[in-house]
Image: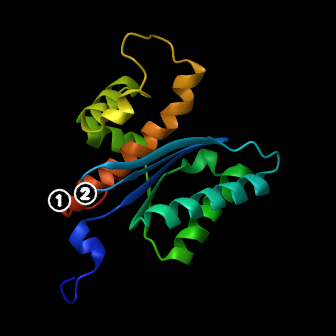
Amino acid sequence: MPEGRTSSEILGPRVLGIGISGKTCGFVVLDPWSLRHFEAKTLRQACSLERAQALGETLSRLQELFHPTHLVVENPGRHKLRYPSVQLTFAAIQKLGSELSVPIQFLELFRCRQALCGRARSTRIQVGQALGLRYPELSRVAMPATRRVATDKDKYWQHVLDAATLAQVVLDQAKRGSSSPR
């Protein structure tokens, strides 16, 4: 390795994207060349504290496997932060990020969808198609354009597409060297 340069400067950033909504989370690990990993997970624990611990365990496992250089999370917004379960979830994410000294970005999903699709009001289908073009593995979990109403399976995998949207926007920003969409 050339002197004075880190592995992330040579290999590029590796981004762990997290899409969170209630009890279901989507996780995606992207690097500049490929989709490294994606999964959706339902946190079935009854207590909010247990759910936050389960999320922390999953994040620790993903960090050990993939060593991300960036962590990007869907910004919950003020209306969701009033719920204790959401507060505990984001506290667990911030704690893990500080322990690992990985920079954490909280981005608005709406703005990231705009940046990814280039349209002000991008639909889930358009986001799925845009991500499917870049990463064919994700096209099998995206909602088909012919379906009018989302099934439970579509809603479950939508968290993965949300995480991939966030991670792709951070990768695109790193390539351009620009600031994040708020």
Q: Is residue 93 above or below residue 95?
A: above
Say whether residue 4 is left or right of residue 94: left
Say whether residue 7 is left or right of residue 21: left
The part of the image, by quadrant, that contains residue 178 is bottom left
- Report the label total: 2
Between 41 and 75, the one lying in front of the other is: 41
Report which residue position mark 1 lands on.
176
Q: Residue at x 18, y 85 (%)?
A: 2
Q: Which mark is residue 97?
A: none
Q: Please rate how many residues cluster around mark 2, counting C-alpha atoms within 10 Å: few if below 14, some from 14 to 19, many from 20.
A: some
Say whether residue 96 is left or right of residue 48: left
SS for callout 1: helix
Spot occupied by residue 38 in the image (x, y as percentages of width and height)? 46, 44
Q: Is residue 32 above or below residue 70?
A: above
Q: Are marks 2 and 1 in contact (CB under 8 Å)?
A: yes
Q: Residue at x 22, y 89 (%)?
A: 4
Q: Residue at x 67, y 41 (%)?
A: 23
Between 35 and 104, the one lying in front of the other is: 35
Spot occupied by residue 88 in the image (x, y as percentages of width and height)? 69, 58
Question: Three-letter amino acid code at disc 2?
Answer: Gln
Report which residue position mark 2 lands on.
173
Quarter of the image that includes the N terminus = bottom left
The part of the image, by quadrant, that contains residue 12 is bottom left
SS for callout 2: helix
Question: Three-letter amino acid code at disc 1?
Answer: Arg
Spot occupied by residue 67 in the image (x, y as percentages of width and height)? 44, 67
Q: Residue at x 27, y 43 (%)?
A: 115
Residue at mark 2 to residue at mark 1: CA–CA distance: 5 Å
